[in-house]
């Protein structure tokens, strides 16, 4: 099954507009604000028209409906990503808040002076600031996987970092650079081809 970008675009009403005559909107700032498909817009509309209330805070009809919808979404997400439990699904407002949550909860509880956190040179500042703060606070070590001018990891240096890491749990990389719009490579050019 191939990915049909035009069919996916049809799900997003905002992507039907043009930025100028004949030029369709292309939106690449999804870590800041994600665009919503029609199904999400309609679900939000139904919620605000029929069930808008605080979750987990009331015993009236609207609060119970809102709570059931909220927890139902958590169950669907858990099933979709194959999480062991819906309790593992934590909602945050954005990527920055999610990274901060990991850095300031898990990392503060588990990292100690001398532990190594490996990042890439393509990280957005929102994935740099918390680790630099923990470096100052806890004495953790930071190192960076270099990338080529094309945005590919320099694989020979990456292997050195991985050998030096005490644990895979210390490795944190971005799937796509929002700073450079460069995806983590699935293939490597001749300078970065991994040794077998």
Image: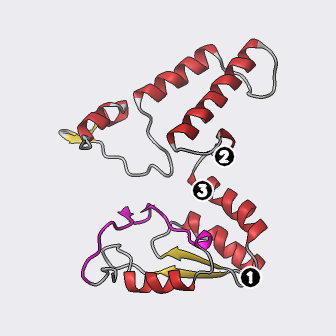
In this view, the mark in front (3 or 1): 1
Element type where label 2 sits in the image: helix
- In the rendered image, residue 12, in percent from the top left (x then y), is placed at 36, 33
* 2 and 3 marks in contact (CB < 8 Å): no
Residue at (33%, 83%) from the top-left corner?
Answer: 195
Quick one: quadrant of the C terminus? Answer: bottom left
Check disc 3 and report the residue beneath it: 96
Q: Is residue 148 magenta?
A: no
Q: Nearer the viewer, residue 158 or 11?
A: 158
Q: Nearer the viewer, residue 102 or 42?
A: 102
Q: Which mark is residue 139?
A: 1
Disc nearer the start of the sequence (3/1) = 3
Element type where label 1 sits in the image: loop
Residue bounds of the magenta highlight: 168-190
Q: Which mark is residue 196?
A: none
Magenta: main secondary structure equals loop
Is residue 193 left or right of 171 when viewed as pictured?
left
Instruction: Decide: is 29 above or below 195.
Output: above
Check disc 2 and report the residue beneath it: 88
């Amino acid at each position: 099954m191939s990915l049909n970008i035009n069919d996916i675009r049809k799900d997003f009403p905002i992507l039907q507009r043009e930025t100028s005559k004949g030029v369709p909107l292309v939106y690449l700032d999804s870590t800041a604000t994600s665009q919503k498909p029609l199904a999400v817009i309609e679900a939000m509309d139904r919620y605000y028209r029929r069930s808008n209330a605080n979750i987990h805070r009331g015993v009236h009809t609207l609060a119970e409906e809102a709570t059931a919808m909220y927890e139902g979404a958590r169950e669907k997400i858990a099933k979709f990503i194959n999480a062991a439990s819906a309790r593992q699904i934590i909602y945050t407002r954005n990527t920055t808040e999610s990274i901060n949550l990991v850095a300031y909860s898990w990392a503060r509880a588990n990292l100690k002076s001398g532990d190594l956190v490996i990042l890439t040179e393509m990280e957005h500042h929102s994935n740099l600031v918390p680790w630099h703060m923990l470096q100052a606070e806890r004495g953790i070590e930071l190192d960076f996987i270099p990338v080529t001018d094309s945005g590919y990891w320099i694989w020979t240096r990456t292997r050195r970092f991985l050998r030096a890491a005490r644990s895979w749990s210390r490795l944190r990389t971005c799937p796509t650079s929002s700073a450079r719009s460069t995806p983590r490579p699935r293939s490597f050019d001749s300078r970065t081809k991994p040794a077998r």
